[in-house]
Amino acid sequence: MAIYGVAILAGCFVVGMFFGEIIGTIMGVDSNVGGVGIAMLLLIVVVDKLQKKGMLSMPAQSGLAFWNAMYIPIVIAMAASQNVLGALTGGPLAIIAGVAAVVISWTVVPLLSGKKARESAVEFNQSHPLKTQEVK
């Protein structure tokens, strides 16, 4: 059931929006800066802590898994509401920041997972349920 775990999600969202507004104010921008990202990172940390302590029921975990799957469409919808054209015409900083974030992510994710990208791909291919079978 998707309703379980929504209180945790809502709490993380409110805290993330609050800190996003504070960051925006500090930067002198009349906008929320990173609130959704902060909320999702906080949600990951809180859920992990609750799972390790055994304080999260299976229905709540199921509900949180549902909202975790909804994360990408929500972020896309929120990004569509931003003034992307204004950011791009304001200078090359938006493009540089976007490219830098992607490159840093590609570099850091394998380091954080403890595996090389090649090892991860091989492991996925071996364990994937739809892998191709040899024809005899």
Image (tube, grey):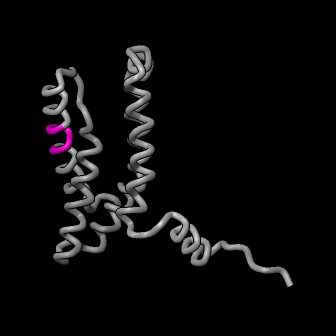
Compare residues 71 and 86 and report the one nearer the observer: 86
Q: Is residue 89 above or below residue 34?
A: above
Question: Where are the magenta residues, as a range?
Answer: 15-19
Prevailing secondary structure of the magenta residues: helix
Q: Kindly identify the residue that appears in the image at 27 percent across and 59 percent down.
A: 44
Residue 112 in picture, x, y percent from top left: 35, 63
Q: Kindly identify the residue that appears in the image at 17 percent across and 43 percent down.
A: 14
If the image is split into quadrants, where does the C terminus sit? bottom right
The image quadrant of residue 15 is: top left
Q: Is residue 47 above or below residue 40?
A: below
Whether 119 is among the magenta residues is: no
Residue 89 in picture, x, y percent from top left: 43, 14
Q: Is residue 55 above or below residue 109?
A: below
Compare residues 71 and 32 and report the one nearer the observer: 32
Q: Is residue 89 above or below residue 18?
A: above
The image quadrant of residue 134 is: bottom right
The residue positioned farthest toward the right in the image shown: 136
Q: Kindly identify the residue that appears in the image at 24 percent across and 67 percent down.
A: 48
Residue 53 in picture, x, y percent from top left: 16, 76
Compare residues 116 and 15 and report the one nearer the observer: 116
- Figure label count: 0
If the image is split into quadrants, where does the N terminus sit? bottom left
Residue 59 in picture, x, y percent from top left: 30, 70
109 horizontally vs 130: left or right: left
The image quadrant of residue 26 is: top left
